Amino acid sequence: MANMSLKKNEMPSQDPMVRNRNFQEVALGYTEEQAIDEATRCLNCKHHPCVAGCPVEIDIPDFIMKTAEGKFEEAYQIICQDSSLPAVCGRVCPQESQCEAVCVRGIKGEPVGIGRLERFVADWHIANAQDEPVRCPENGRKVAIIGSGPAGLTCAGSLARMGYAVTVFEALHTAGGVLVYGIPEFRLPKDIVQKEIDALIELGVEVRTNMVIGRSITVDELLNEHGYEAVFIGSGAGLPMFMKIPGENLKGVYSANEYLTRVNLMKAYLPESATPIKKSKKVAVVGGGNVAMDAARCAKRLGAEEVYIIYRRSEEELPAREEEVHHAMEEGIIFKLLNNPVRILGDDKLNVTGIECLEMALGEPDESGRRRPVPVEGSEWTLDLDTVIMAIGTSPNPLIKATTEGLDTEKWGGIIAEDPSGQTSRAHVYAGGDAVTGAATVILAMGAGKCAARAIDEELSGMKSCAEKNNINI
Ligand code: FAD
Ligand code: SF4
Ligand code: SF4
């Protein structure tokens, strides 16, 4: 008998006024009892719309049914048929606009907590099960992966399971991409990401850090001189954009990327860390996406007394996940919506002292379908500050395009690649994730990595893949 409660089981979490001073995980995860209770809210719908709402089409009703029966390992194995990072996706996927948005239980009441259940099952597996890597015999063929974010890691894992010798080249000193340098510890603990990377290494994947492709070695050299038969580019979109307003060069203005990298990857929040970060009192973060929420919540945790989000549209248009906005508000972040900075103010020592903004109103919808913000004349106001963090978007770094023969890109820098194979204009070179789409989501990047792995295998083996023959999930 289904549990007909209209509300999801609450996820236990740290108290907002305690957690806004520490970097430990905010949401604490379901207990076994809560997970089973939540799972029994699922109606096991015949047409299961939730599955179509998931970009990698996890068999959601099946894994939830196993969870309801207390068969957590079986539930985990069902998820793993389609996703290689369930503990990550259960935490950071925008479920509310994907699988949960179309859950039948959401018509009257709250949808089934699919993401929360996925997280529970993945955490249960990490705590209780021992993985034995399953892979095809080595086929002696080498594939290079550029970038160790979710796109690169997924592609690497899929190819390794099919018997390829895979090398991941990562520019930074630690693998994981945005999962380690962008998304903060309090949303995605780094030991979870590291476990996923360790599992790949156990599968035989070689991870070479501090290797900037285009500088240390080029794509052409990988193909022509180092014996790689195919290359997958999963280099993300890590180049920050600025507003091009006066004052952006002042001391105390950061890109969100730099700020978050210092905090997350370089652990600037630990007293023993060698990486400095400004001890700010009043901070404004410009932007309304997940990156802006993460930067604001980090600034608060680093001790800032007042932290503002300045966003030019209204709450309805905020692109960040609902949960992140809600958590940020609970933690005391102040939202200045319908406002746009026009100038950052500084003193004669070139330190930030404030920001000047204009109020905005919403006009007609623009090409994105969202109502265009238009300035309200004469509405200038200023806010005293010592730090400004710009979180208005990123684009792919042009280095790989500039150093690879025959690789076509869009004007804005995205690599042009066929959907779903990821084949680029350059033979034997595939691409996927943010490097192709621009800043998007973890699950879409993973989906692209997986599709490209299939396409690479098809190209290189020219026959039914080893995984298919041996019934191995990639
Ligand atoms: P990335 O994760 O960016 O990885 C690319 C990797 O390539 C990096 O490690 C980079 O160092 C490396 N690289 C780049 N150039 C080179 C080179 N020349 N040579 C070698 N290596 C190179 N998505 C969600 O779904 N939910 C969220 O809650 C969420 N929050 C986010 C918060 C922040 C702060 C940010 C920045 C993004 C967030 N995203 C979120 C988006 C999501 O993280 C990305 O869409 C996803 O990580 C893209 O994966 P990727 O593998 O394409 O690229
Ligand atoms: Fe939902 Fe994301 Fe899990 Fe798919 S991967 S079921 S969209 S939480
Ligand atoms: Fe269960 Fe919702 Fe999917 Fe129906 S739509 S099977 S209730 S998760």
Image: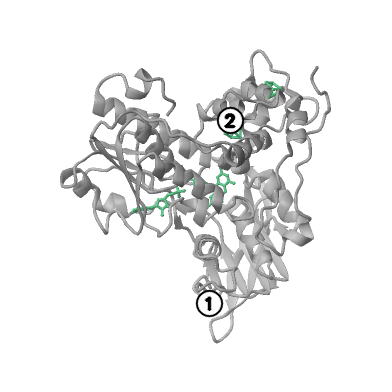
Please, is residue 335 above or below residue 143 in the view?
below
**Is residue 437 among the parts visible in the rendering?**
no
Location of residue 389 by image quarter: bottom right
Q: Amino acid at mark 1?
A: Lys
Please, is residue 367 above or below residue 310 in the view?
above
Q: Dividing the image into 4 quarters, which one contains the C terminus?
A: top left
**Is residue 73 among the parts visible in the rendering?**
yes
In this picture, residue 191 sits left or right of residue 338: left
> Which dot marks residue 461?
none
Residue that lies at the very extreme toward the top in this rendered image? 46
Q: Amino acid at mark 2?
A: Tyr
- N-term-proximal mark, 1 vs 2: 2
What residue lies at 22% left-to-right and 47% top-to-bottom? Answer: 222
Which residue bears the numbered disc 2? 76
- Tell me the crowding category of disc 1: few under 14, some 14 to 19, or many 20 or more residues within 10 angstroms, Cα based: some
What residue lies at 68% left-to-right and 21% top-to-bottom? Answer: 65
Which residue bears the numbered disc 1? 251
Where is residue 1 shown, x and y percent of the image?
A: 80, 17
Where is residue 335 shown, x and y percent of the image?
A: 72, 58
Quadrant observed for ligand 2 in the rendered image: top right
Does dot 1 land on a helix, a strand or a loop?
loop
Residue that lies at the very extreme toward the bottom in this rendered image? 348
Q: Is the residue under label 2 in contact with that under label 1 (CB below 8 Å)?
A: no
Where is residue 219 shown, x and y percent of the image?
A: 24, 47
Does dot 2 land on a helix, a strand or a loop?
helix
Name the mark nearer the viewer: 1 or 2.
2
